[in-house]
Image (cartoon, helix red, strand yellow):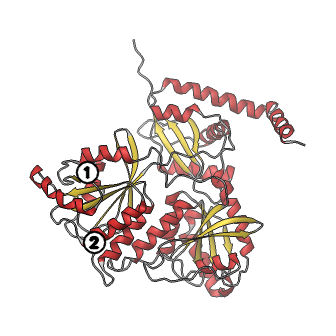
Amino acid sequence: MTNDETNQEFEASEEFDPTLELDDARMRTLRAGLDDYEFEDDDEQLLADFDFDPDAPILMPALPVLAIVGRPNVGKSALVNRILGRREAVVEDTPGVTRDRVSYKAEWGNQPFTLVDTGGWEPDARGIDKSVAQQAEIAVELADAVLFVVDINVGPTSTDEHVVRMLRQSKKPVLLVANKADDARRDIETADLWSLGLGEPHPVSAAHGRGVADLLDKVIKVLPKESAVAKEEYGGPRRVAILGRPNVGKSSLLNKAAGEERVVVNDIAGTTRDPVDEQIELGGRVWRFVDTAGIRRRVHLQQGADFYATLRTQAALEKAEVAVVLLDVTHVISEQDIRIIDLVLESGRALVLAFNKWDQLEDERRRYLEREIEQDLAHVEWAPRVNISARTGRHLEKLVPALETALDSWDMRIPTAKFNAFLAELTAEHPHPLRGGKQPRILFGTQAASRPPTFVLFTTGFLDPQYRRFIQRRLREVYGFEGTPVIVNQRIREKRQRRT
């Protein structure tokens, strides 16, 4: 049978299915009822395509990424707060307050973008030049444009010059920001900064807001409308990130899957910056595996191990579609393991849990492990689990069906008619509890995106978080979604004011 004949047969079977016709009629009635409510432009865009191809993965536009880099105590976090218009980043008059890369949603001139605040580092045994450059290099790699912040009171330093060389090689748009220019008299001091070779310095005062609006006008001109870094790739092998704390067996897994020694493991912080990408045939298909350096527990600030490893892991996740988190069954599931899993959840990638060194698991340890899984991994009980030995290759073949299941769920799209039928049945059986004498209603629902599955509910009032979690659980019970996060957002809308 040809593809056309198959499609015609499928369409014919749909045409005579009374359930599908009923669901579709109900959906269109609910959709028409939304005309009585106030909507914003992005609501209309979301609802305009509510009945398109259910098998096509839908993605939200990837917002452009603006990274802020610079030495310690030049005012990066203060500038972040000024751009956001609120106090989000922690600001103290001491270097090194910002340890981790932190992302915020920002907007200027009706252009939304992701703002990334990074930490500066104090001198250590290897020298501040190397540490700051490593930090900046990773941040720049994940950005569409960069604000390089220097202190106008200090002028260009050797560390600044070291980072500038890397910025030039990155080919990314870079705006040089001369911070702490509290009044116009300080602007003349920006003349020294031309020597850095990044073009015109932009004097600003993050503390007082002076010059920030003009700076943001220039930022919007260099940022793309959609990120060239964070956008999804289509076609080719599916991309798998291998994550886990140091010495858990990530590189051993990659080597065994590849059938040869391709990766040398070195857990010294900062020595292995770039993830190792490998095309590997496993289970009869080709995959692209990404090996990452392990995430260490929090260590002394000067070593910076946690910071660099976290950045590398985030870089791998942003390039991946599914993450395999390795857990060492011979050790207690730790806070580090939970933190790595949470990074995957925050990234919205599919998830597979691989319990490594299973061949070394003793009976007594097995009993404790089952209890740890029940207590510590309850929030990811939906993730496929495989028990393997990366060193020997035992049960490695079980990884493939787990990956395929997680990716199928990650790609899954529920037709809008079916989703609204699901919501109608759910709310009829379990209506939202009364709050202050009022009961919020779900007017309409649609799947706004896949990868991961993201649903938007249009409601007449705020849905309690526990009720949204209940909806997530029922979605998993009905549709599976094994191996993927499921996101349920809401948009509260009020009825239009009728003119008399």
Question: The N terminus appears in which quarter of the rendering?
Answer: top right
* Numbered marks: total: 2
Expressed as whole percent of the image width and height from the top left, the position of residue 368 reads 59, 81
Residue 216 sits above or below residue 443 on the image: below
Point out residue 316 in the picture as x, y percentages from the top left corner: 53, 65
Tag shown at residue 47: none
Q: Residue shown at 44%/23% (left/top)?
A: 496
Check disc 2 and give the amino acid type: Thr
**Could one spot residue 328 in this view of the protein?**
no
Q: What residue is at 61 percent from the left and 85 percent from the top? A: 365
Which residue is nearer to you in this view: 34 or 398? 398
Could you classify mark 1 by the number of other residues whose Cα lies within 10 Å: few (under 14), some (14-19), or many (20 or more)?
A: many
Which comes sooner in the sequence, label 2 or label 1? Answer: 1
Q: Quadrant of residue 120?
A: bottom left
Q: Dividing the picture into quarters, in which one does residue 180 lie?
A: bottom left
In the figure, is residue 322 to the left or right of 308?
right
Q: Residues within 10 Å of mark 2 (few under 14, many from 20)?
A: some
Dot 1 amino acid type: Arg
Q: Which mark is residue 82?
A: 1
Residue at the extreme left of the image, as rendered: 185
Front-most of residues 253 and 336: 253
Residue 303 seen by the camera: yes
- Residue 1 as seen in the image, left or right of residue 72: right
Question: Pointer 2: what residue?
Answer: 159
Residue 346, how many percent across, how many down?
49, 59
Q: CA distance from mark 2 to mark 1?
A: 25 Å
Q: What secondary structure is found at the residue carrying circle 2? A: helix
Where in the figure is residue 422, as x and y percent of width and height? 65, 41
